[in-house]
Amino acid sequence: MGLVKIKDKYQIAIPEDIRKKLHCEVGEFLSVTLHGNEIVLKPMVIEEKYSADELNRLEKVFKSPHNRGRIMNADKFKKHQERL
């Protein structure tokens, strides 16, 4: 068990031995929960909402000069994506 000090903006540093055991890296996410009077940190994996292919198709739709100012419902938008 390590001892940490709460710093400005309520920040703490995770002790090195804990970081190594959990394989924590800079930029990763931790969930923070409260169990009784204990703060629990758990490493989390954040999944991308859209795949790279879906993002590329969305970008084509938004950059297409034919679609500017058009309003589409979800079904029309999906059909339009499939054509690209």
Image: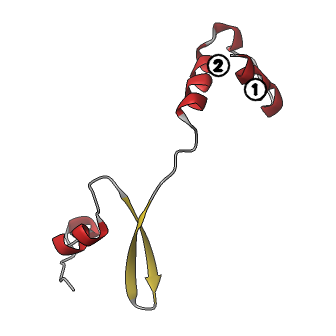
**Relative to 63, is 17 above or below?**
below
Sequence-first tag of 1 and 2: 2
Q: Distance between the residues labelled 1 and 2?
A: 9 Å
x%, y% of residue 38? 38, 87
- Report the amino acid beneath label 1: Phe
Q: Which residue occupies 52% across, 45% down?
A: 48
Give the position of the C terminus as an image quadrant: top right
Q: Which quarter of the picture shows residue 77?
A: top right
**Relative to 46, is 81 above or below?**
above
**Could you tell me which secondary element the residue under label 1 belongs to?**
helix
**Could you tell me which secondary element the residue under label 2 belongs to?**
helix
x%, y% of residue 22? 30, 69
**Relative to 62, is 64 above or below?**
above
Give the position of the N terminus as an image quadrant: bottom left
Contact check, label 1 and label 2, Cβ < 8 Å: yes
- Report the amino acid beneath label 2: Val
Q: Which quarter of the picture shows residue 19?
A: bottom left
Near mark 2 (Cα within 10 A), the count class, few <14, some 14-19 or many ≥20, is: some
Give the side of residue 38 with respect to residue 78, left or right.
left
Residue position for label 2: 61
Q: Which quarter of the picture shows residue 65?
A: top right
x%, y% of residue 59? 57, 22
Instruction: Say which of 78 and 6 sits in front.
Output: 78
Q: Which residue occupies 26% across, 65% down?
A: 9
Give the side of residue 75 with respect to residue 57, left or right.
right
Near mark 1 (Cα within 10 A), the count class, few <14, some 14-19 or many ≥20, is: few
Residue 77 is tagged as 1
x%, y% of residue 62? 61, 20
